Amino acid sequence: MEAARFSAGAFAEHWAAAWNAHDLNAVLALFADNVVFTSPLAHKLLPASDGVVRGKAALRAYWSEGLAKAPDLHFELTWVMEGIDLIVIGFRNEQGVDRCEVLKFADGLVVEGHGTYPVG
């Protein structure tokens, strides 16, 4: 992760702790203002988005909606992988479902993210 503020493992731990505290400001502090985030859940919660959320303000609106619908949200880290300017965070949610997020970095912030879900 070029110029990252955290190692991949430390980033993942910080990311999970912020989500588990339901501290949206702490989560969003990890993302650039011009972030692009894709997720099948975004498509369900915000059908007009077509699953693509552009910009930190839109990401705040999406995740605020998600937290309101999942008040018991909790993530347990299961693994972390690192690439060039990229990390993949594997986690299990409060429903016991394994998921991962693919996060691309520039200047120490996430500029592109992809929420992924199991097939089937």
Image (cartoon, rainbow, N blue to C red):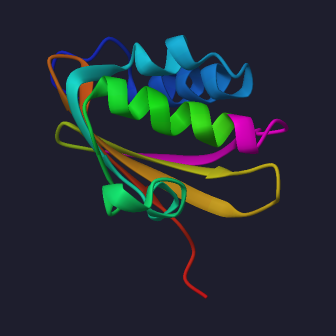
**x and y percentages locating residue 87 in the rendered image:** 34, 42
Location of the N terminus by quadrant is top left
Q: For residue 110, which quarter of the picture?
A: top left
Q: Is residue 88 left or right of residue 98?
A: left
Instruction: Say which of 107 and 78 sits in front.
Output: 107
Instruction: Say which of 4 and 53 sits in front.
Output: 53
Residue 87 highlighted magenta (yes or no): no
Q: Residue furthest front?
A: 48
- The correct choice, above or below, for 48 with respect to 94 in the image is below
- The correct choice, above or below, for 23 with respect to 79 in the image is above
Q: Is residue 35 left or right of residue 82?
A: left
- The correct choice, above or below, for 94 with respect to 16 in the image is below
- The residue shown at (54%, 26%) is 15
Q: Is residue 114 left or right of residue 69?
A: left
Q: Which segment did they paint magenta? A: 68-82
- The residue shown at (68%, 35%) is 67
**x and y percentages locating residue 108 in the rendered image:** 23, 17
Residue 81 highlighted magenta (yes or no): yes
Instruction: Say which of 61 and 80 sits in front.
Output: 61
- The residue shown at (81%, 49%) is 94
Location of the C terminus by quadrant is bottom right
